[in-house]
Amino acid sequence: PYNPDDLMVQCEGCKDWFHPTCMGMTIEQAKKLDTFLCADCAKENGAKRPSNSYPSSPSSDSKVEPKRRKW
């Protein structure tokens, strides 16, 4: 179910939203990110990814419903 209080991170590539735990990271790690790329965008961008971004693991490819506010 949709919960407006759940933290979500937005992919800088496709602009989709993801729960940090679904992407294999903690909430603390998510709050420290400068950028985030989902697995699909990380594959497309490869070496263009900034060193402080956090690509999701290939096993955690499930997308979530978009959320309107950005943390």
Image: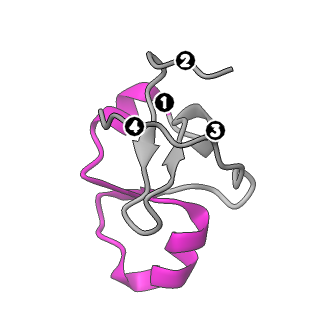
Residue, disc 1: 26
Q: Is residue 7 above or below residue 32?
A: above
Label 4 environment density (alpha carbons within 10 Å; few <14, some 14–19, many ≥20): few
Q: In the rendering, at what x and y percent does residue 64 appear? A: 63, 42
Question: Which stretch did the figure color magenta?
Answer: 26-54
To which quarter of the image does residue 23 belong? top right
**Disc marking residue 39:** none
- Mark 3–mark 2 Cα distance, whole angstroms, equals 15 Å
Q: Do residues under tags 3 and 2 come within 8 Å of each other at their CB atoms?
A: no
- Amino acid beneath label 4: Arg
Label 3 environment density (alpha carbons within 10 Å; few <14, some 14–19, many ≥20): some
Quadrant position of the C terminus in the picture: top left
- Mark 4–mark 3 Cα distance, whole angstroms, equals 18 Å
Helix or strand or loop: what does disc 1 sit on? loop
- Amino acid beneath label 2: Asn
Could you tell me which residue is drawn at 43 percent across and 57 percent down?
11
Helix or strand or loop: what does disc 2 sit on? loop
Sequence-earlier tag: 2 or 4:
2
Q: In the rendering, at what x and y percent does residue 60 appear? A: 70, 50
Label 2 environment density (alpha carbons within 10 Å; few <14, some 14–19, many ≥20): few
Residue, disc 4: 68
Helix or strand or loop: what does disc 3 sit on? helix
**Disc marking residue 22:** 3
Residue, disc 2: 3
Q: Nearer the viewer, residue 16 or 34?
A: 16
